[in-house]
Amino acid sequence: MNKLADQLRNENLGKVLENEPLKNHTTLKIGGPADLFFEPNNTDSLKKAMEYIKAAGVPFRPIGRGSNLLVSDKGIEGVVIKLGDGLDSLEQNGGEFRIGGGYSLVKLATVLSREGYSGLEFSAGIPGSLGGAVFMNAGAHGSDMSNILKEALVLFPDGELKWLTNEEMEFSYRTSVLQKTGGICVEAVLLLEKGDRETIMAELKKNKDYRRNTQPWNYPCCGSVFRNPLPNYAGQLIESSGLKGTTVGGAQISDMHANFIVNTGNAKAKDVLDLISLIQKKIKELHNIDIETEVEIIGRKS
């Protein structure tokens, strides 16, 4: 690992840190160290770095802004690649926008809505990066990324860089083909429509206010913990099961929204996992529903 770190530094490909605590890079503020943490300067730096990572034969894991992740207390083996500020380009061609995977989704929605482009209103207040949103097919308020994505530039684990069309992304509820292949969304082309700026901004504000008023963003959290087992809603099932406010260690099922687990201070990944297990067991017992996690649980087993 030391040799790989030296190679990445010598090539000046980006930020390289060893044994970096991942609690510094997740919105839940939980996570042990990455053996090696790498934040590329740009797409070319990422491609070059992948050559070294592949040659070294070490595992790697991409992350965005850490909003949908629960990282093990024991951290992550190999290299964690963060798509951050070096991958936040934005180019426009009419209603087509080519955007870096590291671009903040909240910022993107605000910037383009102010310019009078419609399509991202649903994402108001959704934390994380554009690349992560494509990976998860993030959505809210009746829309999601599949409705606005034209194509995505994906870096696959074998080092191949390839554009995938919307159809090839195999989008469905909170999923895409990237979850099967381990690909990284490096860039995305979005198709947005020109509209009335004031109307778009009003919709954006309404969605942002709704999120602020119904979700506990005053505490570190990872977003929705469970997928909605439609036609049911995870939060309603958890609340009706009497689990709202339940605490394990420093983790708590939010009093504000039962599908959120918050870090009330120094929570461990194990605390969150214990709450997840408790919820799943109770929902199965009371409602005979197998409720699945939406948050990605990654890293070394505890």
Image: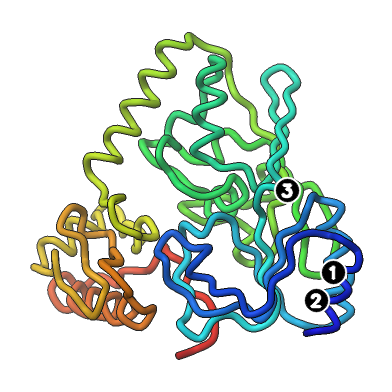
Identify which amino acid the numbered label 3 is placed on.
Gly
Give the numbered dot on residue 86.
3
Q: Is residue 176 shown left or right of residue 239? A: right
Up-down relation of residue 75 to residue 93 (above or below): below
Whole-percent x, y for residue 270 in the image:
35, 83
Q: Are marks 1 and 2 in contact (CB under 8 Å)?
A: yes
Report the front residue among 220 and 150: 220
Q: CA distance from mark 1 to mark 2?
A: 5 Å
Identify which amino acid the numbered label 1 is placed on.
Leu
Mark 1, residue position: 8
- What secondary structure is marked by label 3? helix
Residue under the point 20% across and 59% down: 258
Whole-percent x, y for residue 240 in the image:
10, 62
N-terminal of the pair, mark 3 or mark 1, is: 1
Give the numbered dot on residue 103.
none
Residue under the point 28% across and 63% down: 262
* Other residues around mark 2 within 10 Å, as few (<14) / some (14–19) / many (≥20): some
Mark 2, residue position: 5
Q: CA distance from mark 2 to mark 3?
A: 18 Å
